Image (cartoon, grey):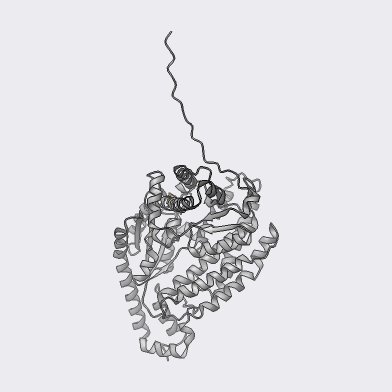
Amino acid sequence: MAQAAQLPIISHYTAYKPRPFTREERDSATILYGGLTWKHERLMQGALHNMKYKAEPLPNIAREDLDAGKELIDVGACCPTIFTTGSLVNVLKKEVKEHGKDEVNRKFVYLTAGACGPCRFGQYHESYAMALDGLGLRDFRLFLLAQDELDQGPGNGGGLDINMPMSLGLIWSILCGDLVTDLEYLTRPYEVNPGQTELVLRECVEQLYNVFLHRPDRGKKYKTLAWHLMSKYFTSALRDVRKKWDEIEVDHLRVKAKVKITGEFWLQTHEGEGNYNIKRWLEQEDSEVVPPPVAVWLHYLMHPTIRKLEHRNSTSKHPKVESLALHALERIYRGTYNRFRKALANLPHELPDQEELKRLAEPFYHFELRGGEGHMLIGKALHSYHHKTAHMICELSPYSCMPNTMSVGSMANVVGKYPDLLYAPIEVKGDAEVHALSRCQMILTEAKKRAQAEFDGVMKKTGLSVERIRKYEAKHPELRKATYCVPHRGYVGTAANYVMHLACDKGLARA
Ligand code: SF4
């Protein structure tokens, strides 16, 4: 009888499962997190410290993180995955060197956002797990924070209780982080004393950190929700920020090209080497950057559920009631953001209407195509074009990102239909800076010409001169304060709107 062939031993894939993080460990283990700007992360730290967690943001992404990530994860990974994994790897390597593996496994846990869906975002944790394997740290614990549940409860050992007060603290800190970031980018290009915006910004962020640190405890569920929505605690803190911001002197007559940043979530939010420091570079190149708030993404996340309920594809027994509740929630969300904006003299930009973004993008990109920022990249570019809020769009596309490739492809169609829309898609690999920036510069040159032509046109139309405006400003010093809100008067550039505002609203043209 022929001998049976020996079957190969199959080693099945086992997904990473973290060891429990217990309630008792909460006082000794530090939660690491990252992925946003230093401002958002500092305010989130305040919210976490308030909940008695030890929490530390990872250092800002650096070029070395790309190399560390490339070494340990899949070759085909998208650039944000490589950077963020590399960042965690470099921190853990350093800690292991100083304290040993057991101590690192005991002393730290990593908290990151999770999701499912077609892009690699849903698989980030697998990349982290792969890197942990490579480092011999399979016992290190990383946890996912679902983006669509405010009350996930105490999971896996009870050390991390993702409850309503924690989620609201984190969301509110993100909203405040967005608003101060918006103020920063609105002000710095026009500051008269170089470096003053940065100094005031740092003071304000520390002040807000303390506001989150001392946030009062208002119970676990709906009481805390009601308090967050109605309390004046945050608006009065933001009014204090506004008072500090008042100290910054600005010159709104500087002609700048306005550049709206869009693109993949992580790349567009990041400020540092992960995107070639492109926002700072654009400012050095005489632009005013319009940064993307994280709040737009959170708002976007509500919409698939709303649509599902509207189409009754949901498993819900009461789709109509739930849809109404979600619409109400959406109004409350925008209302909260606007309340915070009002405390800051309405300077930060308003959140775009998600329905409008969807409608604008619809002929080019179907809103049901999820992954990355979905239809929003098209929607935001067209929103900006129609509302005249930027001279050009700089879209940051990560190397090896499927959803972004689709959006850049669709933008070819958009640009065909709107030939005067200035659009610079920048592929970011992390190590091709000169190529990316020179590509951006080509479009920026055209944007700067448009900003100058627009300004010259307004000066001519109003008959005003710079000397005359300066004299008027000397008598009205409030015009030179960073908190002075230059209204939109139908132009893109700040300087052009400012002159038009002085001419029409202040009567300077007739004087
Ligand atoms: S959107 Fe693109 S870059 Fe971002 S996580 Fe998904 S695949 Fe990666």
Q: Image check: 385 left or right of 333? A: left
Q: Examine the rendered structure and indicate whether residue 396 appears above or below residue 2.
A: below
x, y (%) of residue 291?
A: 44, 65
Q: 261 and 453: which one is in front? A: 261
Q: Examine the rendered structure and indicate whether residue 406 appears above or below residue 347.
A: above
x, y (%) of residue 10?
A: 46, 28
x, y (%) of residue 1?
A: 43, 7
Q: Examine the rendered structure and indicate whether residue 479 appears above or below residue 65.
A: below
**Residue 33 visible here:** yes
x, y (%) of residue 12?
A: 49, 32
Question: Which residue is found at the position 33% from the left and 65% from the top?
Answer: 420
Q: Examine the rendered structure and indicate whether residue 219 appears above or below residue 308.
A: below
Which residue, as the protein is rendered here, is positioned at the far top? 1
Query: Which corner quadrant holds the C terminus?
Result: bottom left
Q: 237 and 255: which one is in front? A: 237
> Which quadrant would residue 339 be assigned to in this image?
bottom right
Question: Which residue is found at the position 54% from the left and 70% from the top?
Answer: 206
Q: 312 and 377: which one is in front? A: 377
